[in-house]
């Protein structure tokens, strides 16, 4: 035992100081002066307190002087005020009167293990007013006693009546001291509160019995100071409980809970135990729990005693006193765990701790885990994890080897949805970036990482609420090679007015700058492109019609083929000032760029226009002069209305005979105008229409007045055989009756018109641009009407042609009819009897033929042939079985098309086999002009160069009114069918396959 300036010093009264007591309170009142102690082996100097190590015994002499004594008998006591100290034996006792001896000790002693010694004496001189009592005794300190100071008190009974005549007075202290500073045991977070345990009581330094407060503690969350303590922080905390007991709590202001994904540490300033042994506790880790369960005396577990947990959670088990009364048991209670059909080795909560931490990673999925406290009987306090579940938290990366110019993707999934997860990405410099994600309704989340450092990246995912973790394979990031761009085709050819597709291949980069044109051609633009879908290429689309509008068009006619990619018009420093496109043409350009060669330069890894001066690859975009080549009229069954939506539909129906060229059409069938002209793609795409469909844009262009800027072309279908002194009727296609199909790959536009829905009016104003003014509306197509279709590309400043270009074709309308080849139409009483005829319905049309007995024919019969099909020569034929009929049976043949109720009726008689008449050929309404020779089998999408010449020759005219003679297209006659139609289509529509 040593005494120094750093130890707590006892407070002594001066040796001769008299503690005054108010007279009259007891019969014999007195006061107690401070005493001097001897250790039994070495003298202890005044002002020092004897020290005992925990578990040790010391012989100590207690000296106490009582003054104002006025009786000759009485008793005194020496009391220890803490149960961690006790008297083992009384070695000697003397009582003297002042300086004279003679007082007799009647009894003196203490029970073993008690905290008091009582001394009874008699024979004192009545005139003596001072008595000294000297007691030598052996004192023991409990082995588990913390370091602390213990008061030693005394009382005095003058009259020997048994009750003290003086109040208990502290005359000195004993110190329990292990000569070590307090040692940190553990800290556990439970429901937002940090439970702290030391192996000894903790005091403010230099102040015995003074609890720590918020000024002595810092809490760090994820390496950031939370608040209070020696280091200032943004928030507050509270220290709850008596720290001098070695266990206390820390609560954080404004924080309901700390989640297991967070790193929490505590740090204390200078602290001391009860014997003033100083120490400092720096950066001690706090075990963060995901949930807490409480031991309960109910063997089935009471409220808050049962829980489920995901494997990998850290669960806190709090030990309540028995029976639970809302307070915790800090007596280092042992707990035994039951798991896997057996009780496991017991573990304790630890010194001054009431919480045990269990990592469910040690349990199997599906297990239940139970704890019970000593003495492990039926009345144990118990807590249960009723089910250990699998969160199935998984994380993976889409690529383990990327460059610093690329990205990698982290995919996270779990068995539960809506959970918050932290994705920690650690780069090669050990710097960690945390991304906070929430799993979607499918339990999934994704994070894209753009690495900036070369080396290995690690990824760990933590479920915020449970602390369950998952990691991915490391991602190796290497230095990207210098980005570059190239052109798979260095020469790209198209026609002026069309949309040019330029494919740019990117290597080790996802961006490039593209320069198009130069000063010499009067047009120059720079655009940056970005590969957004990481396929290594961008298809840049350049609308050569809109490009002529320069800055007036959205992005000046530039776009990309794939939505994921991107294009941006860059500043070229052009003319006029502020323009992004340098036109260098006085007065600006027209709507369409002129034919010519436009320089092309691409540079990868940059978006700066200046880098086009040192391109990776150069090429040329060649715009050829556009042409207007022909107009052909085709017919199709009305049943195909709505079924033809794209070029493939047109070619497929040509191949199967449902779309044919013809000079006549049955009212109600589909009329298809095939416009063969290059350079229309750009103006159609650039048109702004309320409905952005190709049909809406095409019709808006053709309906505009001649002076309007968008009126680059029109399609007019006029009656060519109007009555004398009468204006012709006009067919006016609209959004209801018309579908426009742009086959830009073959420089063709198909206009599909439903003649049953098309508007018909008489153009009394002769403007030909839609009904208006005095025009007579509400008319219809009549039998015998002849029509001329004119497709015209206009001549004006903002046009596609320097002179008017017009192509034409003609067609006649007829009332729908179906005719048999004989009337009457007789058959034999045999199988396979042929019934045939002709019609003006479009090839591919279908109808029903019925043969029903008439008159006295017995037995009655009805024979039906469904879906009788009209062939390419507008003939039809079907076979029926008449072997069950009798000679002279009469019948009626009826044909009926469900569309427009087209009917025909012919009578007939069954005759003997071999006696039927040979059908007399009906007169042809059209004659063939040639017998074609088939040279190839057509396909749905033409890919070959046609072998025939176009059927219509465009004419260039100096005026708006065409004066040339219309060129007629071929008509359909027997033998002039599918093959010739295809040859005509290929010959007229596809002069060359100009695009990929």
Image (cartoon, rainbow, N blue to C red):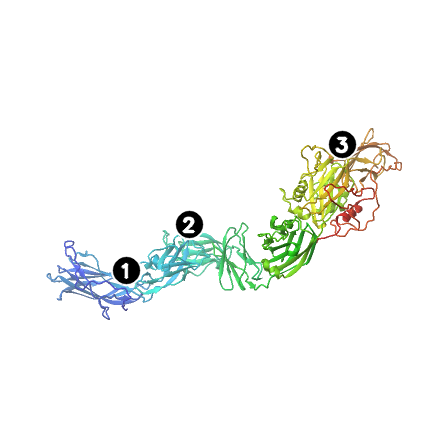
Q: Of marks 1 and 3, which one's residue comes earlier in the chain? A: 1
Task: Using the rendered view, name the quadrant where residue 248 is placed.
Answer: bottom left
Task: Using the rendered view, name the quadrant where residue 691 is placed.
Answer: top right
Disc number placed over residue 725 in the picture, else none:
3
Q: Closer to the camera, 198 or 773?
A: 773
The residue shown at (81%, 35%) is 819
Disc number placed over residue 82 in the picture, else none:
1
Look at discs 1 and 3 and give the one toward the viewer: 3
Q: CA distance from mark 1 to mark 3?
A: 133 Å
Q: Tell me if I can see residue 351 in this picture.
A: no
Residue 829 position in % (x across, y down): 85, 36
Q: Of marks 3 and 2, which one's residue comes earlier in the chain? A: 2
Disc number placed over residue 653 in the picture, else none:
none
Q: Secondary structure at mark 2?
A: loop
Q: Secondary structure at mark 1?
A: loop
Q: Which residue is mark 2?
A: 303
- Quarter the C terminus occupies: bottom right
Is 146 situated above or below 871? below
Q: Closer to the camera, 269 or 569?
A: 569
Residue 702 position in % (x across, y down): 68, 41
Furthest residue to the left? 127
Q: Secondary structure at mark 3?
A: loop
Furthest residue to the front? 586
649 relative position to 323: left or right: right
Q: Tell me if I can see residue 915 in this picture.
A: yes
Q: Closer to the camera, 645 or 397?
A: 645
Q: Of marks 2 and 1, which one's residue comes earlier in the chain? A: 1
Furthest residue to the right? 915
């Amino acid at each position: 035992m040593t005494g120094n300036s750093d130890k707590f010093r006892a407070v002594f009264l001066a040796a001769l100081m008299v503690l005054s007591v108010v007279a009259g309170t007891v019969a014999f009142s007195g006061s107690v002066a401070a005493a001097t102690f001897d250790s039994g082996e070495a003298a202890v100097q005044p002002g020092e307190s004897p020290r005992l190590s925990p578990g040790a015994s010391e012989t100590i002499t207690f000296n106490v002087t009582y003054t104002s004594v006025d009786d000759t008998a009485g008793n005194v006591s020496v009391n220890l005020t803490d149960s961690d100290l006790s008297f083992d034996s009384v070695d000697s006792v003397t009582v003297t009167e002042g300086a004279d001896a003679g007082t007799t000790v009647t009894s003196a002693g203490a029970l073993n293990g008690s905290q008091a010694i009582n001394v009874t004496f008699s024979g004192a001189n009545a005139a003596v007013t001072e008595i000294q009592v000297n007691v030598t005794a052996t004192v023991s300190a409990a082995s588990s006693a913390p370091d602390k100071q213990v008061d030693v008190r005394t009382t005095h009974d003058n009259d020997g009546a048994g009750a003290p005549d003086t109040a208990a007075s502290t005359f000195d202290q004993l110190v329990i001291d292990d000569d070590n500073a307090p040692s940190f045991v553990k800290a556990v977070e439970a429901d937002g509160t940090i439970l702290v345990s030391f192996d000894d009581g903790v005091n403010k330094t230099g102040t015995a019995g003074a609890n720590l407060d918020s000024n002595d503690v810092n809490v760090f969350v994820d390496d950031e100071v939370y608040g209070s303590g020696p280091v200032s922080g943004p928030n507050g905390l509270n220290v709850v409980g008596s720290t001098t007991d070695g266990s206390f709590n820390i609560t954080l202001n404004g924080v309901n809970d700390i989640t297991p994904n967070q790193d929490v540490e505590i740090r204390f300033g200078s602290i001391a135990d009860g014997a003033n042994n100083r120490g400092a506790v720096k950066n001690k880790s706090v075990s963060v729990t995901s949930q807490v369960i409480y031991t309960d005396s109910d063997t089935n577990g009471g409220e808050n005693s049962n829980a489920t947990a995901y494997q990998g959670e850290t669960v806190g088990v709090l030990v309540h006193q028995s029976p639970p009364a809302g307070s915790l048991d800090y007596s280092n209670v042992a707990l035994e765990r039951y798991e896997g059909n057996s009780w496991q080795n017991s573990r304790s909560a630890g010194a001054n701790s009431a919480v045990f931490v269990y990592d469910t990673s040690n349990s199997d999925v599906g297990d239940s885990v139970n704890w019970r406290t000593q003495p492990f009987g039926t009345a144990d306090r118990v807590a249960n994890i009723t089910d250990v579940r699998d969160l199935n938290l998984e994380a993976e990366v889409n690529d383990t080897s990327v460059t610093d110019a690329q990205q990698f993707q982290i995919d996270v999934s779990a068995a539960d949805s809506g959970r918050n997860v932290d994705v920690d990405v650690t780069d090669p410099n050990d710097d960690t970036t945390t991304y906070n994600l929430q799993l979607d309704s499918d339990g999934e989340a994704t994070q894209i990482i753009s690495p900036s450092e070369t080396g290995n990246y690690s990824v760990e995912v933590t479920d915020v609420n449970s602390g369950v973790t998952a990691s991915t394979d490391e991602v190796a990031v290497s230095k990207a090679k210098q980005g570059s761009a190239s052109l798979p085709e260095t020469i790209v050819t198209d026609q002026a007015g069309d949309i040019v597709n330029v494919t740019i291949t990117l290597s080790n980069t996802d961006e490039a700058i593209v320069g198009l044109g130069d000063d010499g051609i009067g047009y120059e633009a720079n655009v940056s492109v970005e590969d957004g879908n990481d396929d290594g290429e961008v298809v840049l689309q350049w609308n050569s019609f809109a490009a002529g509008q320069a800055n007036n068009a959205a992005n000046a006619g530039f776009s990309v083929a794939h939505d994921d990619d991107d294009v941006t018009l860059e500043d070229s420093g052009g003319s006029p000032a502020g323009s992004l496109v340098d036109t260098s043409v006085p007065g600006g350009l027209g709507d369409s760029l002129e034919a010519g060669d436009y320089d092309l330069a691409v540079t990868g890894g940059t978006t700066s226009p200046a880098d086009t001066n040192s391109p990776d690859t150069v090429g040329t975009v060649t715009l050829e002069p556009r042409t207007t080549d022909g107009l052909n009229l085709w017919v199709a069954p009305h049943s195909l209305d709505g079924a033809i939506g794209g070029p493939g539909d047109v070619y497929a129906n040509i191949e199967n005979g449902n779309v044919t060229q013809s000079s006549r059409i049955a009212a109600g069938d589909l009329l298809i105008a095939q416009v063969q002209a290059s350079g229309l793609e750009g103006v159609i795409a650039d048109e702004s229409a309320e409905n952005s469909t190709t049909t809406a844009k095409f019709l808006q262009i053709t309906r505009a007045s001649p002076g309007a800027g968008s009126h680059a072309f029109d399609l007019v279908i006029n009656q060519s055989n109007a009555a004398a002194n009468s204006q012709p009727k006009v067919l006016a296609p609209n959004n209801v009756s018309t579908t426009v199909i742009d086959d830009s790959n073959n420089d063709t536009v198909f206009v599909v018109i439903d003649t049953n829905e098309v508007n018909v009016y008489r153009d009394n104003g002769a403007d030909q641009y839609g009904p208006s003014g005095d025009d007579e509306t509400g008319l219809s197509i009549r039998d015998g009407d002849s029509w001329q279709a004119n497709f015209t590309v206009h001549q004006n400043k903002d046009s596609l042609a320097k002179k008017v270009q017009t192509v034409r074709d003609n067609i006649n309308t007829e009332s729908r009819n179906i005719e048999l080849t004989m009337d009457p139409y007789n058959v034999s009483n045999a199988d396979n009897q042929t019934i045939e005829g002709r019609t003006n319905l479009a090839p591919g049309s279908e109808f029903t033929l019925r043969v029903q007995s008439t008159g006295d024919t017995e037995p009655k019969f009805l024979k039906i042939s469904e879906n009788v099909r009209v062939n390419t020569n507008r003939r039809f034929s079907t076979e029926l079985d008449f072997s069950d009929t009798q000679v002279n049976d009469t019948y009626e043949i009826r044909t009926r098309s469900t569309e427009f109720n087209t009917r025909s009726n012919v009578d007939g008689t069954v005759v003997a086999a071999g006696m039927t008449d040979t059908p007399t050929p009906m007169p042809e309404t059209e004659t063939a002009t040639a017998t074609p020779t088939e040279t190839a089998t057509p396909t749905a999408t033409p890919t070959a160069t046609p072998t025939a010449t176009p059927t219509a020759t465009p004419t260039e005219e100096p005026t708006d009114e065409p004066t040339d003679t219309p060129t007629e297209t071929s008509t359909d006659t027997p033998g002039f069918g599918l093959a010739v139609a295809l040859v005509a289509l290929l010959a007229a529509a596809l002069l060359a396959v100009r695009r990929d």
